[in-house]
Image (tube, grey):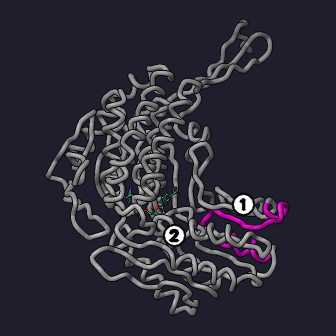
Amino acid sequence: MKFQPTASHFINGEYVEDTAGEQIDVIYPATGEVIAKLHSATPAIIDQALNAAQAAQAEWAAMSGTERGRVLRRAADIMRDRNRELSILETHDTGKPLQETLVADATSGADALEYFGGLAASLTGEHIPLGGGDFVYTIREALGVCVGIGAWNYPTQIACWKGAPALTCGNTMVFKPSETTPLSALKVAEILIEAGAPKGVYNVVQGYGNVGASLITDDRVAKVSLTGSVPTGRKVYAAAADGMKHVTMELGGKSPMIVFDDADMENAVSGAILGNFYSSGQVCSNGTRVFVQKGIKEAFLNRLSERLATAKIGDPLDEDVNFGPMVSENQMNIALGYIEKGKAEGARLVFGGARIEGDGFYMQPTVFADVTDDMTIAREEIFGPVMSVLDFDTEDEVLARANDTEFGLAAGVFTNDLTRGHRIVAGFEAGTCYINTYNLAPVEAPFGGSKMSGVGRENSKLAINHFSEMKTVYVSMNDVEAPY
Ligand code: NAD
């Protein structure tokens, strides 16, 4: 395949291979074909990457913010110039339609590099007067070597959402992509070097969970930022706690989307489509529990079905296609398993519900109605194109039910009643809320979850606090008074 990285790892400014590591087959989800064979990092590779990141950190942190920012902004420009080839690679890695990857992956990675690059020169501490001439000043310092661990749904975006704020603050990074989609992060590393980043500032090593685990526990590492599932988050958080390391956890969800009977029906259906079927439903913040007020339920389901019937399912490299395969056979089987559970537990299948036969990992967009709160499909994260529609009568009732979950990643409401919209989001137990829209994640706004869905925030100025810490310096302008 064209544009493919030339080796498994990228360390200290160059591609590195070690075939002693366990083989990782990269499969194109649209055909089931193996498109690349990589190798998991051996202990020697992990050591090499951490050493490179550690050696590069002091020099990188000593550069001015303006200089660091310039590197990131140049990298953003290169990514935009190569958007098409990076998008084609991302489509091969993930199976997501090119129509999506052209606008949501390298472009959003470039946004992060540009935004954090722009902030780099204005990262400062404070001056705090204490009276009598004494004062305190604070110095914003980098944490050191940061580890990023990625999920498979947005490989380029995740590599940049973690790398850009980390590097801006003067940290260096060792990034481990998901073993399912290992290719794109290597391109991010390559581009950063081309943009002028010193060697060792951003390194990529491949591997399964065990490689991630050995990175976190290493003494050279100051922070870990994970995007992944709640069970992995628990393990990573616990391992980081042992070394008192900083963490950011971007984990799973089972987010509610509430549609009141005064909502604009067409917008509500659009929101439900975006929040359930974009990237074949493999988006962490998806609003997979769609609560629809009783009076408009059938109208909502009819319009939704009409519009889903027009989805173009097929070859993801065809730019007219807007619904691609699942990322892997395993993920497809997980989602199909949930469809069987939904049927068995008495939900009404309204649309789809089956695999699309062929070599690729395609399944139909699927909608269940008459779902109740206790059904498995309403409680567990499916991470596939399976929407549950639940009925409700009143505002108080639906808010309580929407919050009745261990997750707290996102939540949305569709209503034309202004005060009700704000009242509902004030009551949502979720980190990222939407009124009359769904699933936006621009770099300017904080993104992340509460409850079991995460710790910390990505994007926005808040991310800076998660990749730096303050040193407090007391300065006395007077004599020191001691009691004896
Ligand atoms: P996953 O938890 O299986 O794996 C995530 C990453 O963690 C992978 O790189 C994996 O190799 C690594 N890993 C696994 N075990 C580990 C361990 N013990 N120590 C260190 N690293 C380990 O998740 P996935 O299947 O790749 O991705 C899907 C999940 O990610 C879903 O739950 C989804 O909601 C979540 N997600 C969250 C966000 C967000 O921003 N909140 C974004 C995308 C995906």
* Disc 1 CB within 8 Å of nearest ligand 1 atom: no
Position of 245 with respect to 179 (left or right) is: right
Who is closer to the viewer here, 4 or 216? Answer: 4
Q: Does the magenta stretch include residue 184?
A: no
Q: Which residue corresponds to the image point at 50% horizontal and 41% vertical from the top-left?
A: 112
Corner quadrant of residue 130? top right
View quadrant of ligand 1? bottom left
Who is closer to the viewer here, 391 or 171? Answer: 391
Q: In this view, does 430 lie above or below 132?
A: below
Q: Is mark 2 on a helix, strand or loop?
A: helix
Q: Give the range drawn in magenta.
A: 396-421
Q: In this view, does 211 lie above or below 463?
A: below
Instruction: Tell me the number on the disc at residue 435.
Output: 1
Disc 2 target residue: 277
Q: Which residue corresponds to the image point at 39% horizontal and 28% vertical from the top-left?
A: 57
Residue at mark 1 to residue at mark 2: CA–CA distance = 19 Å
Q: Which residue corresponds to the image point at 52% horizontal and 53% vertical from the top-left?
A: 249
* Disc 2 CB within 8 Å of nearest ligand 1 atom: no
Decide: few, some or many residues near mark 1? Use Cα within 10 Å; few <14, some 14-19, many ≥20: some
Q: In this view, does 397 lie above or below 245?
A: below
> Mark 2: which amino acid?
Phe
Q: In this view, does 437 lie above or below 104?
A: below
